[in-house]
Image (cartoon, helix red, strand yellow):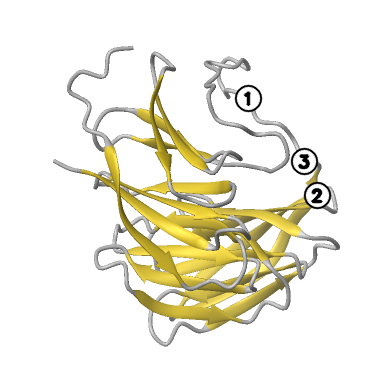
Amino acid sequence: MSTTGYKPYRHLKTLIGHQRAVSCVKFSNNCTLLASASLDKTLIIWSASTLSLLHRLVGHSEGIFDLAWSSDSHYICSASDDRTLRIWDARPPFDCLKILKGHSDFVFCVNFNPQSNIIASGSFDETIRIWEVKIKMNSLRFRLNHSVFRLQKLWNYSSGKFLKIYQGHTNRAYCITSTFSVTSGKYIVSGSEDKCVYLCDLQSKAMIQKLEGHSDTVVSVTCHPVENKIASAGLDGDRTVRVWVQDA
């Protein structure tokens, strides 16, 4: 594929703050914050603009595998090997608002629905739990609504088929996430076990750039909602979040 006109991403800054592998990194929906989760049992909230550390969220007794932002970016939900989820206020004083208990094994994924009134969590106990969230008077109330699903592989919801297969990265041992970048062109961005971040053209599937710099497997990547900015997370041999930008 011709990359004529493509402006490559460059390394902007390395964020150092975690003491163990960084398992997940995500920009907030309102574009102002970046959150990272780690096996050191903490989450860190960073400024998405200055990339400075704003606050460290402490409370889990085991490593954290995943995190999710509410649609309004006011709350973070974290999923941990301690078999719980925690709901945090992403605004000062950054309180833990609720601990969700019910899974009997490691909790490895979590997400809010678009309205942020439902949380879904997946666990190695082979269940997906659906939690109902109600916000009233700046407080959160939760109740377990369902716990009936087994883990499933998701396909295209309309056709039930793969649309495309993107190749280039290495993925044999870890659960590595991919995401879309749509702020300048349309790309698939993915981590890799060869310590790199890969950008592939959404339509042609061609690999257009490989970002090098991490010193261990990159398991999580996130793209800024409106800026040409990518953040990537490295495992225990790295323990950093690296931020990449594409110049205008």
Local packing at callout 2 (Cα closer than 10 Å; few below 14, some 14-19, many 20+) is: many
Distance from disc 1 to disc 2, alpha carbons, whole Å, reads 19 Å
Estimate the x, y position of residue 11 in percent, counting from the top left.
32, 50
Relative to 64, residue 11 above or below: above
Element on which disc 2 rests: loop
Local packing at callout 1 (Cα closer than 10 Å; few below 14, some 14-19, many 20+) is: few
The residue lying at 42 percent from left, 87 percent from top is 93
Residue at the far bottom in the pictured view? 93
Q: With 229 as the anchor, is 193 left or right in this view?
A: right
Can you identify the residue that label 2 sits on? Answer: 127
Q: With 224 as the anchor, is 23 left or right in this view?
A: right
Kind of residue indicated by mark 3 = Leu
Can you identify the residue that label 3 sits on? Answer: 151
The residue lying at 40 percent from left, 40 percent from top is 211
The residue lying at 63 percent from left, 60 percent from top is 236
Kind of residue indicated by mark 2 = Thr
Can you identify the residue that label 1 sits on? Answer: 155
Relative to 31, residue 94 above or below: below
Kind of residue indicated by mark 1 = Trp
Between 169 and 212, the residue placed more toward the observer is: 212
The N terminus is located in which quarter?
top left
Distance from disc 2 to disc 3, alpha carbons, whole Å, reads 6 Å
- Quadrant assignment, res 61: bottom right
Element on which disc 1 rests: loop
Disc 3 vs disc 1: Cβ atoms closer than 8 Å?
no
Disc 2 vs disc 3: Cβ atoms closer than 8 Å?
yes
Estimate the x, y position of residue 210 in percent, counting from the top left.
41, 33
